[in-house]
Amino acid sequence: MEKKIVKADHNNPVITIRGLEKAFEDYHVLRGIDLDLYQGENLVVLGRSGTGKSVLIKIISGLLTPDKGEISVLGHNYANISEKELQELRIRIGFSFQNSALYDSMTVRKNLEFPLVRNRKGISRQEIDTAVETVLDAVGLSQTINQMPSELSGGQRKRIGIARTLILNPEIMLYDEPTAGLDPITCIEINDLINEVQQRFNTSSIIITHDLTCAKQTGDRIAMLLDGQFQRTGSFDEVFDTNDSRVKPFYDYNFIQ
């Protein structure tokens, strides 16, 4: 089912990127990226493996440095940002890792408490408990609070990873292949959760994927990364209304009957 498009605030970009380039030795991954993410929008970045999708969001989160170009996130220009400002900005950006990145030696509760205790000095026990309960309820897994990650299914681990990201109330969510390795039913549940997070927490999100069902269900706008640049942007139907030999097989693999 295609996602109902929400009305993003196109007068309020929360991420602005111009002329972004990144290479690893002689391999040029990003070759001049221009991108805007607007307040309240779910933007899906599509592309084949190795096209630089994950590199892009690592640059946005400050984990990688671009070779060239300008990037502004929540009003902060990365060209002028100090390390202290970058650390403070990262708290406002939620990064949902592909492998969920849970600590296997900690219970679900402790996994969720960790970012709060680390980043919110002086937070009370009651505030911690309330925050943990709120995000567990948001992802529908309140019953797992005392379980270990090893006791959870892949879909549950993914949900807890999203909950741990949400606990700091980020303004921007970055999802890296949120449905990778999951069965079709669990994929639908994760897609629904991404939409619920957008509405409940008023987030702006970039969703990195090569799963077209995920793109169709979660994306208000789609951007297809081809040959290091965004070659096609728009609604799902607009992006795939083409005979471009780089795009059509991508669609056929996912949806051909």
Image: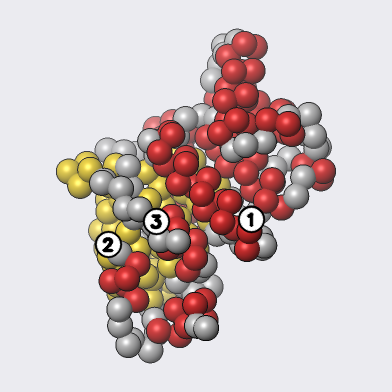
Amino acid type assigned to the residue bearing label 2 in the image: Asp
Please tell me whether mark 3 or mark 2 is closer to you in this view: 3
Q: Is residue 172 in view?
A: no
On the image, the x and y values in percent for residue 98 come to 60, 55
Amino acid type assigned to the residue bearing label 1 in the image: Thr
Amino acid type assigned to the residue bearing label 3 in the image: Lys
Query: Which element is circle 1 on?
Result: helix
Q: Earlier in the sequence, mark 3 or mark 2?
A: 3
Q: Earlier in the sequence, mark 1 or mark 3?
A: 3
Q: Quadrant of residue 199?
A: top left
User: Local crowd at mark 1 within 10 Å, few (<14), some, or many (≥20)?
Assistant: some
Which residue is the site of mark 2?
34
Which residue is the site of mark 1?
186
Split into 4 quadrants, where in the image is the N terminus?
bottom left
On the image, the x and y values in percent for residue 93 come to 44, 39
Q: Is residue 125 in view?
A: yes
Q: Going by the image, does 191 lie left or right of 243? A: right
Of residues 213 and 38, the one drawn nearer to the viewer in this rendering: 213
> What separation in Å lies between label 2 and label 1 (alpha carbons)?
33 Å
Judge whether 147 appears above or below 227 on screen: above
Query: Which element is circle 2 on?
Result: strand
Which residue is the site of mark 3?
3
User: Local crowd at mark 2 within 10 Å, few (<14), some, or many (≥20)?
Assistant: some
**Residue visible at 38% across and 76% down in the picture:** 226
